[in-house]
Amino acid sequence: MESNAMEPKLEIKSYATNRLKDWKNFTTVCTALERMYAQGSFLQQNPLSFAFPLLLMQLSLASGTALLTSLLLKPLQQSLIVAQTLGGLILGPSGLGRIDAFTINFFPVRSFVLLDILSSFGFMLCFFLIGVQTDPCVLKKINKNTFMIGIITVAVPMVLTKAIAYILAYCINMDRQLMSSLPMVAQAESMIALPTVSYLLGEFNILNSEFGRVAMCSSTVSGLFSLCATATMVLAGQSVNGNAKTIVTNISSVIVLTAIIIFVFRPPILWMIQKSPVEAPLSRNHFVALLTMVLVTAFCSQAAGLNIYFGPLILGIAIPAGPPIGPALKEKLHLITYWIFLPLFFVKNGYNIDVFHVQLTKYIIVQLVALVAALGKFIGAFVTSRCCCNMPTAHAIAFGLVMNTQGLLELGLFKQMKREKVIDTPTFASMYVSMLIITGSVTPVIKWLYDPSQKYTVYRRRSVMHAKPQSQRRLLVCLHDEEIAPTIINILEALNPRRENPLFVFVLHLVELVGRGRPLLIPQKLTNRPSSRFGRSKGVIEAFRDYEQKNLELVSVYPYTAICPCATMHDEVCTLALDRKTSLIIIPFYNKLHADGTIESSQKAAQIMNKNVLDKVPCSVAILIDRGLLKSPWPVLGTLSTYRVGVVFLGGADDREALTIGARMANHPKITLTMIRLVVDGNVTGNDKEERRVDNEFLSNFRQAMVANNRVTYIEEIVTDGIGTAAVICSMRNNYELVLAGRSHDKQSPLLSGLADGSERAELGAIGEILASADFEGNTTILVVQQHALVVNEHNESHKQHGLGAPQPIKNDERHSLGDSHSIKDDKEQMQIQEKSA
């Protein structure tokens, strides 16, 4: 943590070592004041001979090379750090820098003072952003399993690298400096940093998966253990050298500066958060104040004799995770920091590294230590994740590779070791190259091995059809705005909640977030009075609060707000459905349809989310198409004499699920249910005999259960092809307040001939496409249902590919319970306990 005030001199001296023969007499860089700005090429002046135009050219080269390498490596799923590290080597003596004309014109020695200052400024902002994205609350999520994983993942490489370092020192004749530095090289290569792991997981959008949570908790333990071990070694070495005063000074400076940041700088930050709504953008005054704090803490770090990056890093960690500050800072600073200033940092490092001047023996020794450290991390992480967390083999391999990644923090440590002369320049170059090789090798393998959607796999069906009749009904409803809330409330009321069948509704308001790697899920509390803490979720929460208050002991509502990028929005939906054991998810269609058939512009976030949810959902899902019938927040069944519900049945698992939902609604005294079955020439169609058998058995049970209900009508319509199917469906317009249909059907069925191939919106299926088309005019609300399917063997997999799901007979003993059928009051108390623990 010592000061880096001498770094520019050391960096320029190292650069001069590679470029100048008489570098020992190199002490001063002089720049004339009149050589700052060029007068123009027309006056026969070379712009590169002046400081400011030269700096602009260096910024252009650094950013352009970083962009080019990033685009070239994109097919290999490489991270930004790998691309920029490689870009620095390309511009340095290991690449284009070997051409004297290139170096003399674009990167002369005189330019490195200003270059070093700007790169240090960018690196300081980068460390601040790393701190902002590091959530200290992850410490609360550490359990004994992740603690064991974190300790062993660091302990194994430390033991192996120390052993190989001493063996190499004993068996190989090497220079004294390398021999003395090998233990510290081994220690540095064994370290694991939480921000590095967090950055990689964020790039791959798997931060909020179960895999990501284990990696975050384990890397936190590993980082703390690594820090303690490294600090012990450094302090022990300084004690041997008699630098006791330096030890006391450094520790005191760290404690004092950390206390100042926590007790002086953090309270104003908390005040800013209090004055801003959760989703409101950060004001200009608050942003400038925060940026000023970064500069002041960096100055305090230098004044205290610490590294200039220490203060901004601690300040970033001290800022509470989540909006409004975290996303705003990343959105405003990420681009200029990572694409303008940070490439300069890698170019500066690249010019200090000439891989062709590194002795082969020294390079092999350092690479061997780095390889042993990587192997030790992998073994420790792989074995413990398999034993402690029961990870699948592929996930455990990916986990071991994640713990091997290195980034800016590790590079900063290597530079600190070089600055303190713990290692020499060739050793630093070898460690630099090893970081590039290891991180560049593991990132594409991680992407190939780990599929985040696998965390949503369940081994028992979660659907309305397979739930016990006398049990809780757990539903997750998703909204992007409050406009669709009344329609969803109408559907919930139609589901006819009763004391023996209470309704548990988990309301998820989805807010798109741009510029933040870690999604945020905020549990909200229903209160009798409106709260400013609801932010943009206020209208949604108040609508469902009123619905719950009018249905006490029948309905229990649990609102959430998910603030996340649209690419990962489905993760929040599927995770909440998995954790809360819901049997059905209701998601809105991304296009808003009107009664006259016109279509309002689509919401991109909703379109992306719907596609991902349908592919990865752990339970049944229904897409809600709202044509704007009623916009009142109170139930429609209290104002209408009858509420007409229609179900279109062609056959298949999705249609059976839709009819099950309709059957649940049919028990409501004001609902009339009409089930329309489409057949070809009086015969049931379908190539799968087992599927037809299940359909017939299901319909037989349905008709038997509804025989005493005179509000239920069963109709069979005979059609010959897809045109006849479309005609029957279009004839239903304006005859029903709600129409239910399955999403997927047998594509070989004559009922869909001419429809399936022309479907433009695959998430609705052929029947849903007709119901959402302009031909189906009217105010009808539509639910397109997909039943949760289990893939347990090849036979079921083939059904899934045809959109039929795995066929199973309908038997009461095969249905699983989503909860006990006791009172809503007891369930409410139990859910509150779960919310507090979460």
Image (cartoon, rainbow, N blue to C red):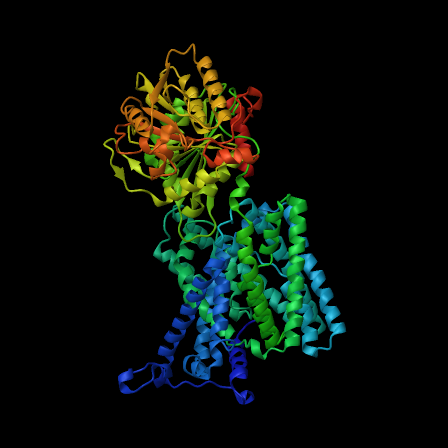
Q: Position of residue 58 (x, y in %)?
A: 41, 75
**Residue displayed at 47% across by 19% down:** 696
Residue 319: x and y in percent read 48, 54
Above or below 614: residue 149: below
Q: Is residue 149 placed above or below 680 in the rendered structure?
A: below
Find residue 403 and report its horizontal and vertical position in percent: 60, 56
Drawn side of residue 482 relative to residue 15, left or right: left
In this view, the residue farthest toward the left is 596
**Most foreground residue, 341 or 659:** 659
Q: As rendered, which of 151 and 400 lies closer to the eye?
A: 400
Q: Residue furthest top?
A: 708
User: In this view of the protein, which residue sits in the foreground, 520 or 261?
Assistant: 520
Q: Is residue 171 visible?
A: yes
Q: Quadrant of the C terminus?
A: top right
Quadrant housing the N terminus: bottom right
As drawn, 40 above or below 778: below
Q: Where's residue 525, x and y in %?
A: 45, 35
* 263 to 368, vertically: above or below: above
Residue appearing at x 36%, y 18% in the figure: 716
User: Who's the residue at 70% across and 74% down the image?
Assistant: 179
Q: Is residue 538 left or right of residue 371?
A: left
Q: Residue furthest right?
A: 170
Marks counted in the figure total 0
Whether residue 488 can be seen here:
no
Q: Quadrant of residue 57?
A: bottom left
When asked about the image quadrant of residue 48, the answer is bottom left
**735 or 47, which is in the foreground?**
735
Quarter of the image for residue 305 reads: bottom right
